[in-house]
Image (spheres, grey):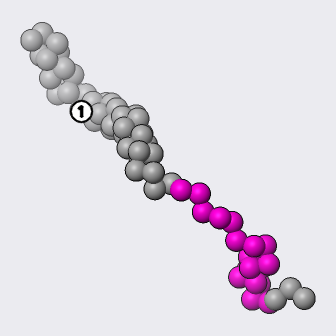
Amino acid sequence: MAVIGKLRMFVVQEPVVAASCLIAGFGLFLPAVVRPILDSFESTKQVPAPALGDVVVGMTGKKQG
């Protein structure tokens, strides 16, 4: 219970630092959890690259002759 009391006192004395630590912890926790979940969906299948001619036409609006 002493740790909880010290934590409460820290939050009361330094609310900005405590909020910053909370946000940083959340930011470090999210990638460690979300990335493996996204990888497990197997939705990251490789998409074939378009032909270079199609890219040129799309960028310039002109066909390569």
Report x, y in % for residue 64. Answer: 86, 85
Residue furthest left in the image: 1
Front-most of residues 6 and 31: 31
Query: For numbered disc 1, what is the local secondary structure?
Result: helix
User: What amino acid is labelled 1 in the image?
Assistant: Pro
Q: Report the side of 41 relative to 63 (left or right).
A: left
Q: Residues within 10 Å of mark 1 (few under 14, many from 20)?
A: few
On screen, residue 56 above or below 7: below
Front-most of residues 42 and 58: 42
On screen, residue 29 above or below 62: above
**Measuring 46% from the left and 56% from the top, which residue is drawn there?**
43
Part of the protein shown in magenta: 45-62
Q: Report the side of 40 relative to 26 (left or right).
A: right
Identify the residue position indicated by label 1 in the image: 15
On screen, residue 14 above or below 59: above
**Measuring 36% from the left and 38% from the top, which residue is drawn there?**
33
User: Can you say which quadrant of the picture contains the C terminus?
Assistant: bottom right
Report x, y in % for residue 28. Answer: 40, 34
Residue 13 placement: quadrant: top left
